[in-house]
Amino acid sequence: MANIQQVAKKAGVSVATVSRVLNNNATVSPATRLKVETAIHELNYEPSMLGRNLRNSESRLLLVLIPSIANPFYSEIINGIQDTAISNSYHILLCETDSNPQRENIYFNMIKNKLADGAISMDPAVNMQKLNELAVYYPIIQCSEYDEGGVIPYVTIDNELAAYRAVKHLIKLGHERIALINVDEKFLFARQRRSGYEKALKEFNIPILEELIYHTEQLEFEYGTHAMRKLLQLEEKPTAVFAVSDTLAIGALKEINTCELRVPEDIAIVGFDKISFSNMTNPTLTTVSQPMYKMGCTAANMLINSIKGNKIENVILDHELVIRESTMG
Amino acid sequence: MANIQQVAKKAGVSVATVSRVLNNNATVSPATRLKVETAIHELNYEPSMLGRNLRNSESRLLLVLIPSIANPFYSEIINGIQDTAISNSYHILLCETDSNPQRENIYFNMIKNKLADGAISMDPAVNMQKLNELAVYYPIIQCSEYDEGGVIPYVTIDNELAAYRAVKHLIKLGHERIALINVDEKFLFARQRRSGYEKALKEFNIPILEELIYHTEQLEFEYGTHAMRKLLQLEEKPTAVFAVSDTLAIGALKEINTCELRVPEDIAIVGFDKISFSNMTNPTLTTVSQPMYKMGCTAANMLINSIKGNKIENVILDHELVIRESTMG
C-alpha cells in the first residue's frame, strides 16, 4: 500500500501539503489539491486511522481499565459503558491491568499518544499518583473505586451505607456473632464496608470482635472458602457472615456446605454485588445489588462529557439489599 | 505540546527530514541531524507512539476479540494470552464484539491501520468471510472456535471426542435416557459436541431421541434453567443430562434443586469447560476440562510467530473428563 511520502512525491508537493489536503485545509490552492487527489487516486492510497488520529486528535476510542476480567462484577458495568459509548459513536478497548504498574503505563501512554480519547479506570489498585497526573491533561473517570483526595471525577455507590444495611439486616434477624469476611483494607471500598459493619454493630451495642473479622488477599472464591474454614475453627462460631463480595460469600457458602451446616439455620450469609451466579447457588444468596449497568452508562456519559470539555460532577448511585434464601428461614 | 511541524519549522527543514532523524535514517547529514535534535530539545517535543507506529509499522499491541466478557470461559484463556504476550514484549487489548459485525469492523480496521500487529479471534459468531479476507494480509489466529474450511490457523480441542467421552461416562453409570442441552448449532463446537453425543449413544445401541435434545439461544445460566424445566416436563424424564457448557449445566442444576430432585441420584449431570464456579456448586459439577490457560499461551505464541512471518500449524490440545459429585453416588 502506498504511503503519504509516495503520494507527496508523485504529486510533487511536500508531505505537509498532502496532510493539509487530507484535512480539507482551506489554505491549499485548488490546483495543488487536484494534483494531490489525483496522486492519492492513482496510488490507491488510503489515509490510515493513525494519520487521521494525528490530524484530528480524535480516535473515538475509550479505554476501560479493569484489574481482572475473571471477576464477574465488571461485566455488567462494561455492558453499560459499551452501550453508551456506541450510541455516542465511540468504541471501547478493555485493558486488563492485573493491577500491574508496568501494564498500566502502556495504557496510559496510549492516552498520552492520542490513541484513545480518554479512560475509565475501575482498578482499585491503580497507581493513583500517576492517574491524577494524567487526569490533569486528559479525560479520566473513576468507576466504582475512587480516590477520596484526588481530582478525578467518579461514579460509585455509598459503600458504608450499603454495608451498614446488610449487617443491620442480620442483626434484625437476631444475630449478634456476625463475622466479616473483608478483603485487604488497602482498598477504599474495603475500609468503607468495614466502617458500615462497625457502625451497625455499635448502633445495637454489639461488641466488635477482632476474631470475627477476617481479611483475604483477593476476591476469588477460594479465599472465601479459606476464610470460612478459619472462622468455623473458632471456639464460639459465628451465626452469620457478611462478606464484602459475592465471590467471597459463595466460597464461604461452599465451606459451610462441606461442613454439613445448614444455611441460614446454622449460619446466615450476605454477599455484595449481585453477580449472576449469586442466584444459582443453593441456597440463593442475599446480597447488595449495585446498579452495575447504570454505573457503566453513567461513567461513559461522564467521560464523553469530559472529552467535550464540560465540567463533571461526582455521582453516587443508589443500591439495594436483595433478600434471598441465605438469610430467609 | 509541540508537534512535528513546529519542530520542522524551527529547524528549518521539512517534516520528512524530522521523520528521518527520528528513525535514525543514515541519509541525514550530521549538521541537519544536529539542527533537528536541537529543535526537538528546545521545543520539548515527544515523538508520539502514533508517529512511531506509522514509521515502524509495529505497535506491539495484539487484539483479542471475544464475544462477551460475561462468560467466565474466556478469562483463563486471556490470562494465558496476556502472560505470553508480556513475556514477548507485547500487550493485549480486549475487544468485546458482542458478535456484532459493526463492532468487529472497528477492530478489524485497527489491524488494517496498524494500530495493532495482529489479532486472536475467539468469537464463534465472527463474520468468517471478513476474517478470512483480513487473514490474507494480516496475522490472525482463531482460538477455541474456528472455521473448518478457512485459511486461518487455530488452536482448539477435539470437541467431538470430548463430548463422546462425557456421554460414555454417563452410559457406563447405567444411564440410557441422557438429555443433551446444546446451544444453537450454527456454532461449530455445538455441532461437534452433538456429534460426539450421538456417537456414544450409537456405540451402545441407545436410540437418539429428539425429545431429549434441547437447543438454547445462548450460554447464560438462565437458558440452562429453562431447558431443564422443559426436560422435566417430559412424560418420561431423563436420568442424566449432558450440557455443552458449565453455565448451562449450572442453570440446569439450579432447576433440579428447585424441583427437589437429587443429583446424582435422580438426575446425573455433566458440564463442559471447568469454569471456576463449577467447583462451587452443590453438588460440584462433573465437567470436561479444557486446558484454557495453555490454549491462550498457544494462541499468543502462534500469533507472535505469525507476526514474525513464520509458517503456523494448527494445534489440537488435550482435554480431560473431571469426575465430581454430580455424577458420583
Image (cartoon, coloured by chain):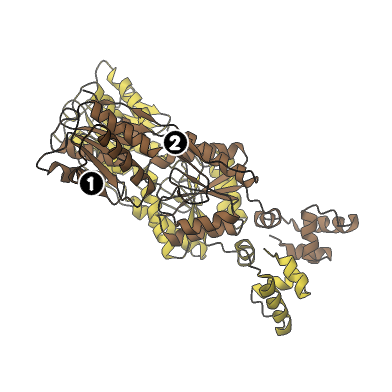
Chain colours: A yellow, B brown
Which of the two labelled residues, at mark 1 and mark 2, occupies the earlier sequence position? Answer: 1
- Name, please, the residue furthest toward the left: B235
- In the drawing, does residue A44 fall left or right of residue B19? left
Q: Seen in the image, is B260 located left or right of residue A314?
A: left
Q: Position of residue A249 (x, y in %)?
A: 30, 33
Residue B146 visible? The answer is yes
Q: Is residue A274 visible?
A: no
Residue A275 at x, y percent in the picture: 31, 43
Q: Is residue B83 above or below residue A49?
A: above
Type of residue at label 2?
Answer: Met
Amino acid type at circle 1 is Tyr
The quarter of the image holding the N terminus of chain B is bottom right
SS class of the residue under badge 1? strand
For the point 25% across and 43% down, the residue is: B181
Q: Is residue B65 left or right of residue A206?
A: right
User: Which is nearer the eye, B235 or A163?
Assistant: B235
Above or below A164: residue B188: below
Residue B327, image quadrant:
top left
On residue B214, which mark appears? 1
Which residue is painted at 44% across and 31% down in the image? B318
- Dot 1 surroundings within 10 Å: few (below 14), some, or many (20 or more)? some
Quarter of the image for the C terminus of chain B: give it.
Answer: top left
Q: Secondary structure at mark 2?
A: helix
Letter of the chain that mark 2 sits on in the rendering? B
Q: On what subunit does the disc labeled 1 rest? A: B
Q: CA distance from mark 1 to mark 2?
A: 26 Å
Give the mark toward the camera: 1 or 2: 1
Question: Crowding at label 2, few (<14), some or many (≥20) Cα neighbours within 10 Å?
Answer: many
Rendered location of residue A80, percent (x, y): 38, 55
Label 2, on which residue? B292
Report the side of A104 relative to B238 (left or right).
right
Along the line of sight, the residue nearer the viewer: B49 or A322: B49
